[in-house]
Each structure stands twice: as structure tokens, then as C-alpha cells.
Image: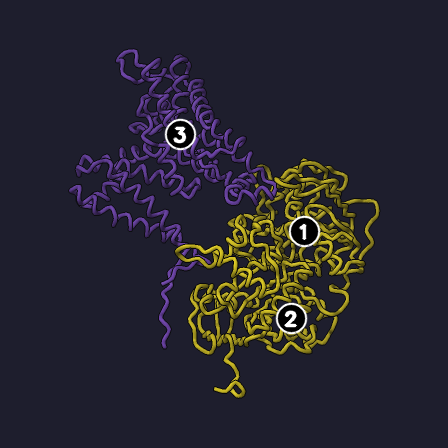
């Protein structure tokens, strides 16, 4: 066997992988080849089948048909243990670390079977792995004190423990600030230089163009293109991802709009067109006024004297790495937990001590990141739509089914909810459920809307729909407080962006002056 | 073979599952009945069919199911809102004690005053017995399952203490109270039946509960609060307050059942006034899917089996406990089948090489 003539066997080959869930074909005869030393990017909208494919490769899910070859040999991967044995490692968005243990302990967990644990050897191996990816890790730090970026590095080190030769990274940059992304990319380059293969899933085109050697684009469970990354235009990729219509239309603006709406960052300057063409905020009238809001926590305040004013006809964004007080802020604003001090007003009404029902009546709309936690799963779409306003549909002591039905029909038409109104709401897709929640909040013409991660997990169409509704609400003179981890979404929609760090507001800038880099600095605590 | 969660289910699935459970119950209980020396088929006929073939039998079935409707409804109301009241037994007994206070100390009241007084006293007694656990749940978040359950033997001890002390029968000296005043008799519904007006009260409660649950804002809020408390709270429903109110109403319904039993059947307080009606109420509510109509149907069925068991013990010499074995097996199979219907079994064929 001469190395000059015979190319090395591909690291991993997926041949004709098909996976169906009921009527849904998640993967339709997918072929994918990963070469040693290659970063292979997988792109696609939500639900295109990327995660299903990687789950199959990692043994978390079994294909209906198809074959997996590792180093040219057919392999049966029926569990993550098989995958690890075959040299495949995966780092998902949700980390599998034990928060209360130290880094070393967590890493030892990954390697232990029965028998004695050799701490010294384990530490040596961790240090070696950390050196391989070119980062320094504090081995004795308790995981819960680490930043998200640091935790991710620990996860990668953990994967390397099993002599991993193919690393799957599922949206690794979604949770990272820009500075951490650079560190991650540096690590990826070091690993591929050693001959490791990497499957890299991302929604962000500039990242893909920067790091990937090869790009495979999935759409509705099929591969629509698999091309070398060099020289690829982000706009072309976006067009391929969203489908042939956009590609043949050749309309740059439309392609950009589609690209941004699925969370892709294209080259053009304005991520979301028409975003800046806003009605000037109505001066003087605050839709939502948060003053000196403080929520005490065990070690330090979870919210520390937060003051934000959202004017009528304005969208104010809150940026921040997750875990810096956003969840607590939304919980407090929704009336689900009491504040330690401070006041919240909707219009001129002080709602600080109000429960959820009174807040809704005062004109506060709520859209939280926990969609399934905002509905009663077993009640119907119809019942969920009117649950917050049952007394408005009373006839004598009874609820008027006729009036509810008319109201619900109008809402379902206006918000394009594609479901049967008598279906239990748990059977709805994420996008349709978000439409129900939007409809429920907007139907009451709120003065102020708190929207947290309103597009997380939604597909292109649903995202664009949510954006249009938020803009319409602003045009109608309501104030919107948008909490999001998607910087492009914030930059595209908001009039102003406030950055939360460690429960405090560390900076505020008009969206027109904001850049990803500037926000990224603020998000990591570097005040301007 | 793999077990998968069903994506959707046809409307016939749940009834089919219940039917399957009933058939399985017959198969499972055939062996013990055979061991006890009777023909299983004859026994089932005695349990289910015979009581309904005679006028007196129907009356006895209705009489037997009356307290079960009260306790079943009480448990269903509480469970529906997510308050797990296991204390219907104690609340039922508290109701009998409260009604007895009226019946013993104001013996001369005429019927139109005496009955409303004693029935209200029973409801109040049940609500009082439910008050402590409900208060602890609301203000200290102490698990109601433990507190309501532990108060059951306390209520029984209270009854026994009263009967061995102040309320000992003044004529016989037995631990049974004196007979109540004449105004305190809940009259029989029909001549020749022992069934009394307590059944009508129970049916009115069933209908009222059914209507409230299905057609009022309150009913929808209760269901929401019970199914997804956090989401219900998010939607502006005052979950803690609803639970509190339902806990007291549940106690009141159970207490009313106790009053109905002593006023309609015993006309005095005895230590054996409840033969576990409160606990059977949990079975009734669960099998009845926590709905008012379901409670009524299951109470009728269990009443039927209870009367049939008496009959079978006389004619077939089967121990009366065999009736409880049949009811309990039915509970287990129905609950198991209703859970199992959410899943389907898929046979995975080996791939042809």
C-alpha cells in the first residue's frame, strides 16, 4: 500500500441514512463523508435533520436504514458507548457536567469503569488534552463557577479522553460570546492539524466560511448541496438552505431577509432589512418602566438595581450571555416571583405587587422562553387561547362557547395558526404554539410586551412571522422588551440594546451604533 | 419488540381499554374464586347481575353506592385541582360526629329544621377536618397526602372515644350513641326501599359538579390548575387559593356524606359507621377519571359488587372479601390499561442481510 497512490480511507462515511418519525422523514437517504483533518460543516434550517443525523452517528438514535462506516469498515453504532469506542465524540448545546463537582472529577467520571480511580494519572491526561486544544483549564475549579465557554472546553476535553478521532460539535457557538468563539476555533484548528475530523453544526455563515473545509447543506431531511467551503459566498449558501425559490429569484434583499431570519449572518450590512425604518418612539410616554429592580440571591443579587424604560413605539433589546439575570428578570416581570426592591410600571400603573392576572389586566403581554410552561398541555388550543380572559367570555355563570369559538376562529385566522381548535395544545409544533402564545398576548392589545427568546427553535417562516408581529406591535404604539441571545435578532429589531452582565446593566446603546464586537465585549463584562 | 408512545389515539381506544381490563379482571379472579370452591361464572353473575334482578336488590345497590358517591366526588374534586386529599375517610367520620351533635343535643327539633341543621353540621364538620391540612399546605407547603392521611385514624379514635365516653348508649351501655330525635330521619325514597333522600343530595352534587367542571370559568381554571399548576399561575389563575377552596369543599362533601349516612341509615352513631368509604372513594374517583359522571358510574358498579358479595357469601359460601378482591383487581387492571393505551408495541423485524 503506497501512500502516494491510495488515498486514506475516509474517517467516517454515512451511506443512505434514512430515519422517519411517523409521517415525517427526518433523514432521507443521506450520504456524508468526513475525511481526517477536515472540518465538515452541516447547515440547515431548524428541523432540516442535522441533529437527527448527528444523533444517529453518535448512537443516540437508530436509523431505519443505511450504513455507517468508520475507517472504511462497516460499524454498528447502537449506543454512545459504541460511538466512543469507534472514536466518535460529541459536544451538544446542553452540557452533561455535574455542576457541583470539580473539573477533574467530572472528567474522571467520563473514564471510570469499576476499580480504583487514579487521580494523578487522570490529571496528567486532562492536562495533556488541554494542551492539545491549546487552552488552560483550572482542574480544581467547581464546574458551576465556570463560564459557558469554559464548560464547553471541559466537554471537549472529556470527548478527547476516549481517543476521539471524530468530534461532533452541535451548534457550539450558539452559547458563546465572540471572544470564546475565537478560542474554540483555535482549538478546532489544532485538532484538525493532528488529523482529527470535525462535524460542525452552525447557523452562522461567517463562522462556517471561516472554519469549515467542506459544507453540506440539508433541507427537509435531504442533502441539497455538499461543496468545498473555499470561495463560497454566504449568500449562495443561504439561498440553498431556504430552497430553490429564493435562489432562482435572485433577489438579494429577499435572500438576505431569509438568511437573517434563520439566524444566519450574511455579508450585507443590515441583518434585517427595514428594521431601522421605525416610527420614532413617542416621547414622554413610557410603556414599561423598570426602576432600581433588585432581586436578592444566595451569594450575590440576581438582579442588581436594574432600570430600563421602554417608550411607547419602541423595541428595547436585552443582550447578555445566558445566566446573567435574563431569566430572573422575565420571571419577575411576568409576576411569577416577588422582587426584593424596586418598582415596575406599565403605563402609569404600578404593577410591582401585582400577581399575573392583575398584570395582564394592566396591559402587560408576556411571551416567555418556556413555551410549554406557558400553556396547559392537555387543554385544547381554544381553551388555552382564552384561559387568561375567561371572565370576558362569561354569559351568566357560564362560559359562552359560541363567543369563545368566534373569538378563537378570528385569532386563528389572523395569526395563521395551523391547527384544529379542539386539538390538545401539546400536539402543536413549536412554531404553531408560539403563534398561539403571540395571539393570546397580542389579542388584548398590550401596552407593553415582554418577549423572551421569542424565536428560539422556530423555523424560518415562524421567525419572520414573530418579527413582523413584534414590529406591528411597535407600530401600534406598544413598547416591547425583547430578551434574546441572538445578537442578529437584537441588532435587526431593536431601537436600543441594553446589556445585562451579572445581574446589572453594564451598557446601553442605540442599535444603530451597536456592533457584534462591541456587544460581545459588554457581554463579557468589559464596560465601555 | 419495541414500545413506542402513541402519536394519536382513536376515540374508541379508551373504552376498549376499559373493556379489556374488565375481561382481564374476570380471568385473574377466576382462580381465587375457584379455590374458594365456587364456579367463577356463577360468582360473577351473583356479583354483578343478581343484585339488579330484584326490586329489593336494586334498592340495596343504590343504598350501598350513596356514601361512595359522596366520598368519590369529594376525592375527585380535590384531585382535579391537584390537591391530593387522602382524608375523605376522616372527613366522612367528622361529618357523622357533627351531625350526631345536632341529633343528640337538640332532639326535639322538627324535621324541616333538624335535617338542614344536621346536614350543614356534617358538611361543616368535614370541612373543619380538612381545614388543618389545607392550611398547612397553603401557608407552610406541607404535603397534604401525609397530613390528610394521618388524620383518618385520629377521626376514628375520636368517634370511638366519644362512644365509649359521653355518648355511650344510655339504655344498653354499648358503645353506640342514643338514637337521634325523630326529626332527624332522612326518609326513605320509596316504600320498601332503605334508600333515603341522601341519594338525591348526592345526585344533585354530581350534577352540580359536572356542570361547574364543564361549563363555567371556574371549572376550566380548576382543570388548568390541576394539570399544569405553574402554567396556570402564569396565566393568572390563583392556584394556591383554588386548591385551598377545593380542599375545604372536598372535606365538606365527604362530611355531608357522613351526615347522610347516619341520618339516613343508622339514625345513631356507631363505631363501624364507615366501612372504609373514604378510602373506597379514592378508588371511585380514580376509576371514574375524576369526572362527576364517572364517579356516579363507578360508585354504582362498586355498590353492585358489594351487594352481590353479600349475596354470594350466603348462596355460594364465598367470603365477602372476595368482592373486595374483585373490585381491587378491577382498579389495578383499569389503571394499568388506561396508562398502557398511550403506548403501542412494534415488532421490529430483523433486517434481511
Percent x, y of residue B320: 23, 35
Which residue is found at the position 76% from the left and 42% from the top?
A347
Image disc number at residue A508: none
1 or 2: mark nearer the eye? 2
The C terminus of chain B lies in quadrant: bottom left
Q: Earlier in the sequence, mark 1 or mark 2?
A: 2
State how far apart marks 1 and 2 are (Cα).
Answer: 33 Å
| Mark 1 lies on residue | A451
**Residue A321 in view here:** yes
The N terminus of chain B lies in quadrant: bottom left
Which residue is found at the position 38% from the left and 43% from the top?
B287
Closer to the camera in the image, A460 or B334: A460
Chain containing the residue with disc 2:
A
Q: Colour of chain A?
A: yellow
Which residue is found at the position 64% from the left and 64% from the top?
A460
| Mark 3 lies on residue | B150
| Mark 2 lies on residue | A211
Percent x, y of residue A524: 70, 54
Residue B77 in the figure: left or right of residue A242: left
* Rendered image quadrant of residue B98: top left
User: Where is A429 relative to B323, above or below?
Assistant: below
Q: Are marks 1 and 3 in contact (CB under 8 Å)?
A: no
Closer to the camera in the image, A159 or A476: A159
User: Where is A477 relative to B51, above or below?
Assistant: below
Q: Which chain is purple?
A: B
State how far apart marks 1 and 3 are (Cα).
Answer: 46 Å
Percent x, y of residue A413: 64, 57
Closer to the camera in the image, B348 or B237: B348
* Rendered image quadrant of residue B294: top left
Residue A225 in the figure: left or right of residue A504: left
2 or 3: mark nearer the eye? 2
Amino acid at each position: 500500500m503506497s501512500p502516494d497512490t491510495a488515498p486514506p480511507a475516509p474517517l467516517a462515511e454515512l451511506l443512505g441514512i434514512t430515519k422517519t418519525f411517523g409521517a415525517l422523514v427526518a433523514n432521507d437517504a443521506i450520504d456524508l463523508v468526513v475525511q481526517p483533518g477536515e472540518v465538515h460543516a452541516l447547515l440547515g434550517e431548524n428541523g432540516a435533520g442535522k441533529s437527527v443525523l448527528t444523533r444517529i452517528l453518535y448512537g443516540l438514535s437508530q436509523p431505519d436504514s443505511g450504513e455507517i462506516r468508520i475507517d472504511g469498515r462497516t460499524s454498528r453504532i447502537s449506543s454512545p458507548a459504541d460511538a466512543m469506542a469507534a472514536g466518535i465524540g460529541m459536544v451538544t448545546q446542553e452540557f452533561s457536567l455535574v455542576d457541583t463537582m470539580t473539573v477533574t472529577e467530572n472528567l474522571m467520571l467520563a473514564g471510570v469503569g469499576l476499580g480504583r480511580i487514579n487521580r494523578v494519572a487522570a490529571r496528567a491526561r486532562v492536562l495533556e488534552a488541554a494542551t492539545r486544544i491549546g487552552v488552560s483549564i483550572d482542574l480544581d475549579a467547581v464546574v458551576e463557577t465556570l463560564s459557558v465557554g469554559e464548560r464547553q472546553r471541559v466537554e471537549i476535553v472529556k470527548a478527547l479522553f476516549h481517543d476521539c478521532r471524530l468530534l461532533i460539535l452541535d451548534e457550539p457557538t450558539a452559547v458563546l460570546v465572540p471572544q470564546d468563539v475565537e478560542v474554540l476555533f483555535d482549538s478546532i484548528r489544532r485538532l484538525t492539524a493532528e488529523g482529527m475530523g470535525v462535524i460542525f453544526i452552525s447557523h452562522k455563515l461567517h463562522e462556517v466560511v471561516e472554519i469549515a473545509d467542506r459544507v453540506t447543506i440539508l433541507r427537509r431531511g435531504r442533502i441539497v448541496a455538499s461543496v468545498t467551503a473555499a470561495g463560497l459566498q454566504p449568500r449562495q449558501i443561504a439561498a440553498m438552505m431556504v430552497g430553490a425559490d429564493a435562489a432562482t429569484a435572485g433577489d438579494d434583499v429577499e435572500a438576505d431577509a431569509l438568511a437573517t431570519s434563520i439566524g444566519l449572518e450574511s455579508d450585507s450590512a443590515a441583518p434585517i432589512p427595514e428594521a431601522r425604518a421605525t416610527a420614532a418612539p413617542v416621547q414622554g410616554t413610557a410603556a414599561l418602566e423598570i426602576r432600581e429592580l433588585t432581586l436578592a440571591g444566595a451569594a450575590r443579587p440576581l438582579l442588581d438595581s436594574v432600570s430600563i424604560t421602554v417608550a411607547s413605539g419602541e423595541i428595547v433589546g436585552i443582550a447578555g450571555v445566558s445566566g446573567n439575570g435574563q431569566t430572573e428578570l422575565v420571571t419577575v416581570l411576568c409576576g411569577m416571583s416577588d422582587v426584593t426592591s424596586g418598582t415596575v410600571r406599565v403605563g402609569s400603573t404600578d404593577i410591582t405587587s401585582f400577581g399575573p392576572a392583575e398584570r395582564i389586566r394592566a396591559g402587560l403581554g408576556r411571551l416567555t422562553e418556556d413555551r410549554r410552561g406557558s400553556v396547559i398541555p392537555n387543554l385544547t388550543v381554544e381553551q388555552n387561547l382564552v384561559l387568561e380572559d375567561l371572565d370576558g367570555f362569561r354569559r351568566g355563570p357560564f362560559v359562552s362557547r359560541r363567543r369563545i369559538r368566534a373569538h378563537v376562529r378570528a385569532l386563528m385566522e389572523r395569526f395563521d395558526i395551523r391547527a384544529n381548535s379542539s386539538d390538545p395544545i401539546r400536539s402543536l409544533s413549536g412554531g404553531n404554539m408560539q403563534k398561539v402564545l403571540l395571539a393570546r398576548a397580542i389579542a388584548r392589545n398590550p401596552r407593553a410586551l415582554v418577549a423572551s427568546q421569542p424565536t428560539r427553535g422556530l423555523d424560518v417562516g415562524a421567525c419572520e412571522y414573530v418579527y413582523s408581529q413584534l414590529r406591528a406591535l411597535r407600530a401600534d404604539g406598544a413598547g416591547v422588551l425583547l430578551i434574546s441571545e441572538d445578537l442578529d435578532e437584537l441588532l435587526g429589531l431593536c431601537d436600543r440594546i441594553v446589556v445585562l452582565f451579572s445581574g446589572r446593566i453594564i451598557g446601553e446603546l442605540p442599535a444603530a451604533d451597536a456592533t457584534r464586537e462591541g456587544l460581545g465585549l459588554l457581554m463579557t463584562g468589559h464596560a465601555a | 419488540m419495541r414500545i413506542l408512545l402513541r402519536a394519536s389515539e382513536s376515540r374508541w381506544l379508551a373504552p376498549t381499554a376499559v373493556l379489556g381490563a374488565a375481561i382481564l379482571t374476570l380471568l385473574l379472579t377466576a382462580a381465587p374464586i375457584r379455590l374458594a370452591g365456587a364456579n367463577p361464572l356463577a360468582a360473577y353473575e351473583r356479583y354483578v347481575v343478581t343484585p339488579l334482578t330484584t326490586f329489593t336488590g336494586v334498592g340495596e345497590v343504590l343504598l350501598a353506592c350513596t356514601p361512595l358517591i359522596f366520598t368519590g366526588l369529594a376525592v375527585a374534586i380535590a384531585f382535579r385541582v391537584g390537591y391530593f386529599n387522602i382524608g375523605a375517610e376522616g372527613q366522612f367520620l367528622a361529618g357523622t360526629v357533627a351531625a350526631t351533635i345536632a341529633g343528640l343535643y337538640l332532639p326535639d327539633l322538627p324535621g324541616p329544621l333538624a335535617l338542614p341543621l344536621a346536614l350543614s353540621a356534617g358538611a361543616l364538620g368535614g370541612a373543619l377536618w380538612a381545614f388543618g391540612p389545607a392550611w398547612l399546605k397553603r401557608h407552610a407547603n406541607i404535603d397534604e397526602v401525609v397530613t390528610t392521611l394521618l388524620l383518618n385514624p385520629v377521626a376514628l379514635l375520636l368517634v370511638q372515644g366519644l362512644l365509649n365516653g359521653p355518648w355511650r348508649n344510655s339504655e344498653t351501655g354499648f358503645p353506640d350513641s342514643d338514637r337521634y330525635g325523630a326529626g332527624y330521619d332522612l326518609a326513605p325514597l320509596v316504600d320498601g326501599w332503605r334508600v333515603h333522600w341522601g341519594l338525591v343530595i348526592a345526585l344533585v352534587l354530581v350534577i352540580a359538579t359536572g356542570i361547574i367542571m364543564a361549563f363555567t370559568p371556574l371549572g376550566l381554571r380548576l382543570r388548568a390548575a390541576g394539570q399544569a399548576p405553574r402554567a396556570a399561575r402564569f396565566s393568572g389563575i390563583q392556584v394556591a387559593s383554588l386548591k385551598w377552596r377545593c380542599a375545604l369543599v372536598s372535606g365538606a362533601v365527604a362530611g355531608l356524606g357522613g351526615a347522610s349516612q347516619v341520618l339516613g341509615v343508622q339514625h345513631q352513631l356507631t363505631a363501624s359507621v364507615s366501612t372504609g368509604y373514604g378510602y373506597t372513594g379514592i378508588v371511585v374517583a380514580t376509576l371514574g377519571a375524576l369526572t362527576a359522571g364517572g364517579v356516579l358510574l363507578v360508585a354504582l358498579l362498586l355498590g353492585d359488587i358489594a351487594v352481590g358479595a353479600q349475596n354470594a357469601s350466603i348462596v355460594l359460601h364465598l367470603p365477602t372479601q372476595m368482592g373486595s378482591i374483585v373490585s381491587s383487581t378491577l382498579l389495578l387492571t383499569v389503571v394499568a390499561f388506561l396508562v398502557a393505551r398511550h403506548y403501542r408495541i412494534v415488532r421490529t423485524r430483523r433486517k434481511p442481510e
